[in-house]
Amino acid sequence: MWRALCEHAIGAVVAAATLSLGWAAPTPPPSPTPELYSPQTVSELKKLEHAALTSDYGWRQVAHLANNIGPRLSGSAQAQKAVEYVAVELKALGLEVQLEKVMVPHWVRGDETASLVQFPGQAPGTTQKVVLTALGGSVATPPDGLTAEVAVVRDFDELKSLGKEKIGGRIVVFNYAFDRRMAEQGWGGEAYGEAVVYRSDAPSAAARLGAVAVLIRSVGNAAYRLPHTGLTTYAADAPKIPAAALAEEDADLIAALVPQGAVRLHLVLTPKELPDAVSYNVIADLKGSEHPEQVVIVSGHLDSWDLGTGAIDDGAGVAVAMEAAHLVRQLGLRPRRTIRVIAWMNEENGLRGGETYAAEHASDIGNQFAAIETDGGAGHPLGIYIAGQPGLRTILQPIANVLRDSGAGLLDFRDEVGADIDPLAKLGVPNFSPIQDSRFYFNYHHTAADTLDKIDRHELAENAAINAVLSYGLANLEQPLPQ
Ligand SMILES: [Zn+2]
């Protein structure tokens, strides 16, 4: 599709150049390059950007999700309340709302305590408290807990080198550090990517060698003795053992004591895995005037972890997607293609929402024009990440030029830009997300400190501006996107 357009364009340029030699043509030649956005669309994009930066609609939405509803783990009463709330709000904007049924895991956190009951230099009759939180999906210890000697490893290679003899019967601590300097340079997502493999894979790796439980060093930045939860995944070929994340300080403490002599830890985790629950993606359409069947998705995920109130992860993403539709309505604009707001369910511990949507739309994938997701908090955006064909850069350049006014004019490519929309990317749908300041996001990510105060209103509005300008621009693009 893209190649054909290019060749057509080159032909038009040559024809125009030939016509202009020698004499003046009686009528102006056709535009030598295919138009991407009409002058009217460009002027509307500028209006949307300005309106976004002064609107507080998105702020009020994330404030309600975080403060009034609270944590929204899949299967919880709060997740259901959030589905109903967002559906009502989007109906009030005049959008056509449908709920797409999704069966979601229903994991519930229980007690989670731990203490060192034996360690070098211990005062008689004392223990040392250890701060941790169960990883999502973890199985429980016996109700009274379990006690075992601790082994500390940095990574999978060290685990293997110790082997069954030194791992069997032990609680294994994986002390792999999130790269703080990387995050401080603005590469928070990349630092997360390097360390998160221990959260997902360490329990099964250690269980294969006979470990009785796994504690990972929290995957996150900052050190205020806050543990970071997140999903772990059990492999089919390994026993399921309890798994938790230690606060960074407690990982350091254990790593300091173990070389001095035997350390034994008592661990109590009592989470429960209940039967899968019925939940929903909230899907709301602002119908297109010319191609209502073609949809531009603008989205965030509605579920959150249970420790905080899900403000930055990802109430903010849902709020800025809702704001995009709100602004288009407020300015009285009618997009040519449909702008579809989606609040995804179950990004955090199953991705069932994104996978269900992609499966249900695989047969009309050609009408899934583009998908945008915001899921990196609410920090200042620098531009737009693209996952798709290289030709998308040229098509997005006029949009980037509009966003440059608020410092968000950068375009950059990534293999994956949003977990919920990635199943669509794998079917060829171009994916986009704001490039957000990631220096501080992983201080709070998946902790009890993911709360509303971490969001700067102006930066949230800047993210809303990207969602509004990008979704409306794509909805009014004068040509197809390369898939
Ligand atoms: Zn998220």
Image (cartoon, grey):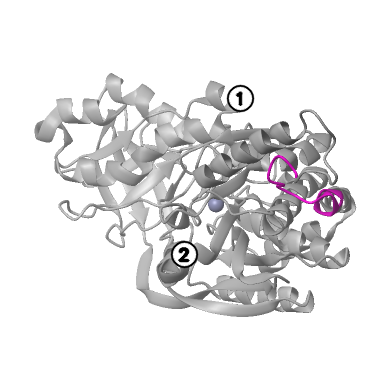
Q: Could you tell me which residue is drawn at 32 percent across and 35 percent down?
A: 173
In percent of width and height, residue 86 lies at 68, 72
Q: Could you tell me which residue is drawn at 29 percent across and 43 percent down?
A: 201
Q: Is residue 125 above or below residue 87?
A: above
Whether the magenta-drawn stretch holds residue 42 is answered as: yes
Q: Is residue 437 visible?
A: no
Single out the residue that lies furthest toward the left: 165
* Residue tagged 1: 184
Res 92 → quadrant: bottom right
Magenta highlight range: 31-43
Dot 2 alpha-carbon crowd within 10 angstroms: few under 14, some 14 to 19, many 20 or more:
some
Res 152 → quadrant: top left
Q: Is residue 138 left or right of residue 261?
A: right
In percent of width and height, residue 133 lies at 45, 49
Res 90 → quadrant: bottom right
Whether the magenta-drawn stretch holds residue 479 is answered as: no
Query: Which is more toward the observer, 296 or 37?
Result: 37
Q: Is residue 455 above or below residue 366?
A: above
Q: Is residue 284 above or below residue 235?
A: below
* Residue tagged 2: 365
Amino acid under label 2?
Ile
